[in-house]
Amino acid sequence: MKYSLIHPIIGLSLLFAIQYIRLITLRIKIINNNDNHDLITKEELTNNNIKNLFEAPILFYMVCILMMVCNVSNSGFEILAWTYVFLRYIHSAIHSRANRYWHRGFIFVLSMIILLIMWMYLILRIP
């Protein structure tokens, strides 16, 4: 159980890799299509999403690592971690494609609530 949180960490890291590959692919298409406006918009959205993956998810990585180091993780916390990862995948899909602000904002708020619960859980479990 001590290292069970490594899987959600890998899952969120994989999202970064997927988005980065998408960004590179879009940039190659832009170069080959000479300033296609639709591709440029998708590239900007994907690039912004990658920047977002360096913001709140850093707190996710920290709380997961601290839970493993302190050896206070359990299956409930693992469910919270996977829920956060799932919400971040949904957030990235919305952000890098349609970018519907209200949908994306709702998912973001849900993920931040999960992250806050994770941190409170850690604080209460530390001896």
Image: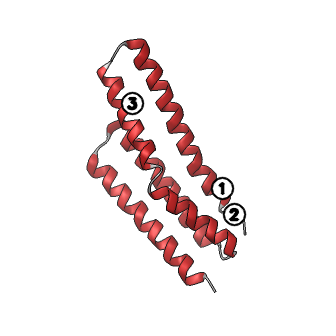
Vertical comparison of 124 with 45: above or below: below
Residue drawn at the location 50% of the way across and 53% of the way down: 86
Classed neighbour count for the residue bearing mark 3: other residues with Cα under 10 Å, few (<14), some (14–19), many (≥20): many
Residue drawn at the location 31% of the way across and 41% of the way down: 99
Classed neighbour count for the residue bearing mark 1: other residues with Cα under 10 Å, few (<14), some (14–19), many (≥20): few
Instruction: Describe the colour scheme in one phrase.
Output: secondary structure
Secondary structure under tag 3 reads helix
Q: Amino acid at mark 1?
A: His
Residue 63 pos. (x, y %): 56, 67
- Calculate the distance from the C-alpha at mark 3 to the C-alpha at mark 2: 35 Å
Residue 75 placement: quadrant:
bottom right
Q: Amino acid at mark 2?
A: Ser
Residue 95 pos. (x, y %): 37, 43
In the image, which disc is placed on residue 56?
none
Between 109 and 37, the one nearer to me in the picture: 37
Q: Amino acid at mark 3?
A: Glu
Secondary structure under tag 1 reads helix
Give the labeled residue for mark 2.
4
The answer to whether 69 appears left or right of 123 in the picture is right
CB under 8 Å between callouts 1 and 2?
yes
CB under 8 Å between callouts 3 and 1?
no
Q: Quadrant of the N terminus?
A: bottom right
Q: Earlier in the sequence, mark 3 or mark 1?
A: 1
From the image, state whether disc 3 or disc 2 is nearer to you.
3
Give the labeled residue for mark 3.
43
Residue 64 pos. (x, y %): 60, 65
Secondary structure under tag 2 reads loop
In the image, which disc is placed on residue 7?
1
Residue drawn at the location 47% of the way across and 20% of the way down: 28
